[in-house]
Image (cartoon, rainbow, N blue to C red):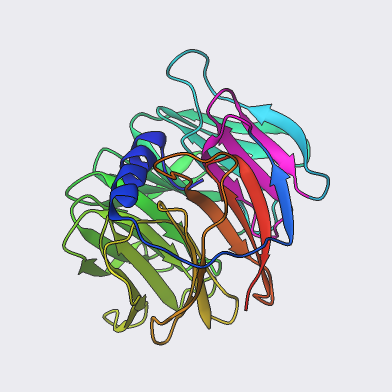
């Protein structure tokens, strides 16, 4: 799950005003998860599990093989409750969920709560491959690398405005943070959280993402451009995605770093060539009902191991599997 509801509503409206067109494409599979729609989603890296933050109820964890709900999760009752961000560990055995003022850790197979911390003003979360650490984005102008087993902060990464998006590399070396101060910043987790570089994208950061091996970093500015940088050295610019004025909500690099899949607030799924930023393929999933503006958002997506298929979940409450050309 990448973004809280307020961000998505603003992004959807802006994207609808910008318009745009793309190809149609038939999915390989389609699953209905929320009739009333979802405001957030997280797909496990292995594509086995899905969390949906549904508009009319709790967050639910799904087994995608059977398309059945395993259980529901919620931290707090009342108006303050509701999952705003979530992430699975690499093996899909740990799930971390964030509400406005708390964070929780769950065993995916059983749904058992294995950790809970009261924590105000949260915005986003990423989880280490082994499920031990969480990178927590905060509206208090910082991100925190938190040991959920020991229950202690390891590193604090400061920004000048609220942190909007966070990412961790699968190899456990890098943390990437993006904030309303227009900067995406890279940190070295193997060197006491050392600051490596920051990039100014000239507007508030909508999304950051890292390749699994930590070689590449993606940063996108809200209704702006998206750039791919090397993590090594001073962060050389590798490519700029060849479309401007777009807001990305989700992203996934292929295992070989050849392509990047992204999901927009404007409903498009795009496949990009990492080395050049060239748009290779784009399509818009159909919505369940004809509405104006057509406001479906691609909340999360995952490429399979060979980057031949892709799973997506949209704000219409529909999950789909697609072939990738």
Please name the residue shown 37% across and 77% down the image. 231
Instruction: Say which residue appears at 76% left-offset and 48% top-offset.
Output: 64
Q: Residue at x 40, y 54 (%)?
A: 166
Rendering coords of residue 32 (x, y %): 69, 41
Q: Which residues are magenta?
A: 35-64
- Name the quadrant of the C terminus: bottom right
Residue 132 visible at all: no
- Is 17 covered by the magenta stretch? no
Q: Nearer the viewer, residue 264 or 182?
A: 264
Count all numbered tags in the image, as a single digit. 0
Q: Is residue 61 magenta?
A: yes
Residue 79 image position (x, y, % from top left): 44, 15
x then y, percent, for residue 248: 39, 58
User: What residue do we see at 35% from left, 35% from top?
Assistant: 6
Left or right of 244? Residue 24 is right
Task: Give above or below for 305 relative to 26.
Answer: below
The answer to whether 185 appears left or right of 271 in the picture is left
Give whichever of 241, 291 is nearer the camera. Answer: 291
Q: Is residue 288 visible?
A: yes
Residue 111 position (above or below residue 315): above
* Residue projecting furthest to the bottom: 275
* Residue 210 versus residue 267 in the image, above or below: below
Extreme top residue here?
A: 78
**Residue farthest along the right direction in this orientation:** 66
Quadrant hosting residue 51 = top right
Residue 125, position as x, y percentages in the image: 46, 46
């Amino acid at each position: 799950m990448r973004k809280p509801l307020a961000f998505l509503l603003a992004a959807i409206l802006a994207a609808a005003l910008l318009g745009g067109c793309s190809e149609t494409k038939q999915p390989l599979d389609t699953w209905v998860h929320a009739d009333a729609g979802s405001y957030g989603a997280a797909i496990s890296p292995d594509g086995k599990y899905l969390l949906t933050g549904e508009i009319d109820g709790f967050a639910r964890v799904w087994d995608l093989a059977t398309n059945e709900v395993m259980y529901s999760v919620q931290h707090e009752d009342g108006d303050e409750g509701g999952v705003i961000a979530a992430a699975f560990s690499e093996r899909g055995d740990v799930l971390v969920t964030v509400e406005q003022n708390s964070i929780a850790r769950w065993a995916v197979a059983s749904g058992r709560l294995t950790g809970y911390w009261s924590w105000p003003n949260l915005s986003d979360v990423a989880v280490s491959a082994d499920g031990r650490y969480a990178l927590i984005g905060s509206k208090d102008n910082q991100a925190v690398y938190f040991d959920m087993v020991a229950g202690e902060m390891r590193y604090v990464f400061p920004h000048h405005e609220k942190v909007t998006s966070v990412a961790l590399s699968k190899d456990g070396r890098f943390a990437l943070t993006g904030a309303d101060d227009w900067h995406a910043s890279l940190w070295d987790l193997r060197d006491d959280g050392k600051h490596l570089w920051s990039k100014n994208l000239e507007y508030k950061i909508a999304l950051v993402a890292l390749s699994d091996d930590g070689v590449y970093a993606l940063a996108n500015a809200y209704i702006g451009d998206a750039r791919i940088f090397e993590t090594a050295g001073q962060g050389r610019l590798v490519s700029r995605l060849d479309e401007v004025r777009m807001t990305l909500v989700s992203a996934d690099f292929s295992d070989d770093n050849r392509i990047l899949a992204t999901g927009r607030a404007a409903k498009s799924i795009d496949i990009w060539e990492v080395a050049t930023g060239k748009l290779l393929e784009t399509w818009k999933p159909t919505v369940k009902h004809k509405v104006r503006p057509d406001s479906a958002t691609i909340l999360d997506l995952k490429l399979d191991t060979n980057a031949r298929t892709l799973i997506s979940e949209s704000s219409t409450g529909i999950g789909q599997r697609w072939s990738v050309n």
